[in-house]
Image: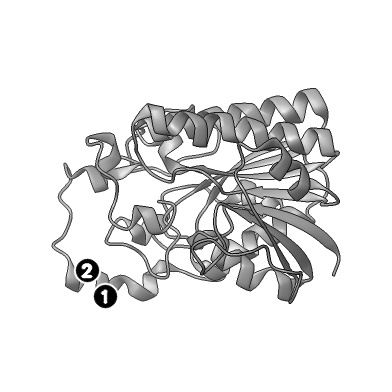
Amino acid sequence: MTASVLVTGAAGRIGGYLRSGLPPLGWRLRCLDLVGPSEPEPEPEPERDGLSWVVGDILDPEALAQAMAGVEAVVHLAGIPTEAPFADLLPANLDGTYQVFEAARRAGVQRVIYASSNHAVGFHESGSLLTASARARPDSLYGVTKAFGEALGSFYADRHGMDVAAVRIGSCFDRPPGERGLGTWLSPDDSVRLVDALLRAPSFGFALLYGISANTRAWWDLEPARALGYRPEDDAEVFAEQILAENAPLTHDDPDRRFVGGRMAVTSAPHPGAREGRT
């Protein structure tokens, strides 16, 4: 094992991909979540197979301090992964993200990988390759919280000398969720490759990048991620024939084609499957 890495929100879908994929690459994971991976309220598990668990809340300073002790990097996934009332987003996505960064600083952790979202730029119209330099244009209050996290990460990089990668994740599922997903998909295996690359990269200060696979129909520029060592191997195109046969073609005015963030730009309803993974 080369280093210990804290994963917040480890019981979720993306957390599950990382729990399966990172230990075989040499990372020892400490997993923090309100619950364990399968039990409603499990006892904390002893370390095994490169995994250990801390059952707790990112808003609990004691749980965070326990989870941060001795780790060398943090992958911050915890939070509400879709649109919700601001009263719900405030503690989970705003205060919680601040608490994670601040606990990392106090513990001397030098690297944080922050799970942002394409919804931080979701009001940009699609049709051309969106670069990481595009200004924040949140399509929802959820997107606003992700833009906040990006700004917070930039602050901690500049003020405290940390390495912070803010990853605007696309649609991270076992397969692309519909026609839009042919451009926005991040495969489970590529999510592991991306995080592994960001954990291994030489010091980079603050980095803003997109998290998708090597999709033939990609909507977003992957060069900033490639510059940090990311080598995606999957392409949503292998699902194209099946997905296009299952779904009516999107019209030009359909929000899922028009906007980078899809339908989130015109409705407060979550994307299908949003509670099972970041979209």
Q: Is residue 173 left or right of residue 259?
A: right
Rendering coords of residue 262 (x, y %): 29, 44
Rendering coords of residue 165 (x, y %): 67, 42
Q: Is residue 1 left or right of residue 83?
A: right
Q: Secondary structure at mark 1?
A: helix
- Whole-angstrom CA distance, mark 1 to mark 2, is 5 Å
Residue pictured at 74% horizontal, 36% vertical: 103
Q: Is residue 262 above or below residue 25?
A: above
Quarter occupied by the N terminus: bottom right
* Residue nearest the viewer, comparing 93 with 199: 93
Graded by Cα atoms within 10 Å as few (under 14), some (14 to 19) or many (20 or more), the crowding at tag 2 reads: some
How many marks the image carries: the answer is 2
Check disc 1 and give the amino acid type: Glu
Q: Are marks 1 and 2 in contact (CB under 8 Å)?
A: yes
Rendering coords of residue 20 (x, y %): 61, 73
Q: Which residue is mark 1?
A: 241
Q: Which residue is mark 2?
A: 244
Colouring rule applied to residues? one colour
Q: Is residue 58 left or right of residue 235?
A: right
